[in-house]
Structure formats: C-alpha cells, structure tokens
Image (spheres, rainbow, N blue to C red):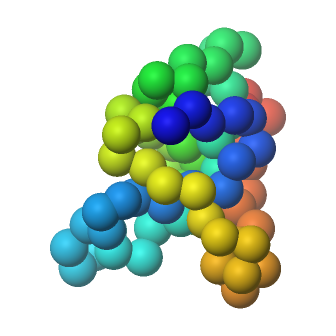
Amino acid sequence: MTFHIGDRVKYHPPRPALFSCLHGQVVYRHGKHDPRNPRVRWQSGWGTTVPAAELALLTPAEAAALPPVQTVSCD
C-alpha cells in the first residue's frame, strides 16, 4: 500500500500492549516523502519512519473518533 502526506494511519497488525492504540499522520521528513517507508507523527508526539507494510489507513469512523495529531514545524 502507498501512503500520502496527511493520511491518518495505525499499526497493522496492532502492536501488543503499549503500542496497540497508536495512531498517527503521515508527514514529511526533512522536506521529503518516501511512500515505502513513510514518516509518521504519532499521537504521542514522536515521529518515526515505519515500513509501509506495517501500516494501515484509519477508517473514516476511526479517524472521526480519535483526536487529531499535533504536527510540528519540521513536518
């Protein structure tokens, strides 16, 4: 699957315990975007690069139920 800037995503399959509730938004990293390994700004505030195979898009219902992700100026 290919992800685009602004996509709301989650880990898939879900991570155990601590990581199971993570959701985030695909952002730029140093002004660039790699669809195969997108940069994700998580709801916790951390930004990490994640293989696209480990991500899934949030459904519209999931996205509406979750708070928006706070991005930072470097995103």
**Residue occupying the point 58% across, 56% down:** 57
Q: In this view, does 46 lie to the left or right of 59?
A: left
- Which one is nearer the viewer's eye here, 35 or 40? 35
Residue 17, picture quadrant: bottom left
Query: From this viewpoint, which residue is outermost toward the bottom?
Result: 65
- Give how far across and how far down residue 16 sits, in percent: 20, 73
Is residue 24 rendered to the left or right of residue 20?
right
Furthest-front residue in this view: 1
Image-quadrant location for residue 27: top right
Q: Can residue 53 be seen in this view?
A: yes
In percent of width and height, residue 62 lies at 65, 78
Q: Residue at x 74, y 72 (%)?
A: 60
Q: Looking at the rendering, in which quadrant would you find the C terminus?
A: top right
Residues 75 and 54: in front is 54
Give x and y (percent) for residue 2. 57, 32
Name the residue at 65% across, 70% down.
59
